[in-house]
């Protein structure tokens, strides 16, 4: 079984005192709370790889999630959160079977 990965990428803010980005994951798009930080990414990196950069069990198969990202400065102030939603399905389909080669006349 091959695992399909996704890269979530964002553009960093322009303030010189930004030291990190906080990444949030919400399963229920009707009640976004953004209370659990799933990853804190140090500047200059502006991406995470899903599911690699998250704790095991963060994502369920065939489920839509909202990802949120904020900037954090050197004294801990946090910006507003930008969001994007996407369905996540990490399992590739089964491979084809019974491959053959035939002579053609």
Image (spheres, grey):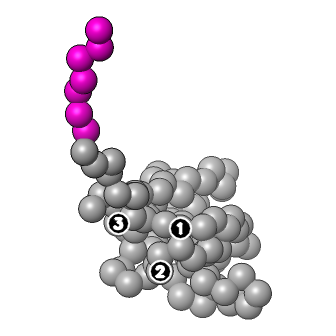
Gap in angstroms between the C-alphas marked 3 and 2:
14 Å
* Mark 1 lies on residue: 88
Q: Earlier in the sequence, mark 1 or mark 2?
A: 2
Q: Residue at x 40, y 58 (%)?
A: 93
In the rendered structure, the answer to whether residue 97 lies left or right of residue 67 reads left
Q: Are marks 1 and 2 in contact (CB under 8 Å)?
A: yes
Q: Residue at x 60, y 84 (%)?
A: 27
Dominant secondary structure of the magenta stretch?
Answer: loop
Q: Position of residue 1 (x, y in %)?
A: 27, 62
Query: x, y percentage for residue 54?
Result: 39, 74
The stretch in magenta equals 99-105
Q: Secondary structure at mark 3?
A: loop
Please tell me how crowded label 2 is: few (under 14), some (14-19), or many (20+) other residues with Cα within 10 Å.
few
Q: Which residue is mark 3?
A: 52
- Name the residue furthest top: 105
- Work out which quarter of the rendered image holds the C terminus and state it: top left
Q: Residue at x 36, y 80 (%)?
A: 55
Q: Could you say which is closer to the camera, residue 77 or residue 101?
A: 101
Label 1 to label 2: alpha-carbon separation: 8 Å
Reading the image, the residue beneath label 2 is 60
> Which sits earlier in the primary sequence, circle 1 or circle 3?
3
Q: Secondary structure at mark 1?
A: strand
User: Which of these two is toward me, 86 or 20?
Assistant: 86
């Amino acid at each position: 079984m091959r695992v399909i990965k996704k890269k979530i990428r964002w553009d960093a803010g322009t303030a010189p005192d930004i030291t990190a980005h906080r990444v949030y994951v919400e399963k229920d798009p009707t009640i976004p709370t953004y209370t659990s930080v799933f990853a804190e990414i140090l500047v200059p990196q502006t991406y995470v790889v899903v599911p690699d950069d998250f704790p095991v069990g963060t994502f369920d198969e065939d489920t839509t999630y909202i990802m949120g990202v904020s900037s954090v400065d050197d004294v801990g102030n946090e910006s507003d959160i930008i969001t994007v939603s996407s369905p996540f399905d990490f399992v590739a389909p089964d491979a084809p079977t019974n491959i053959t080669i035939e002579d053609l006349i």
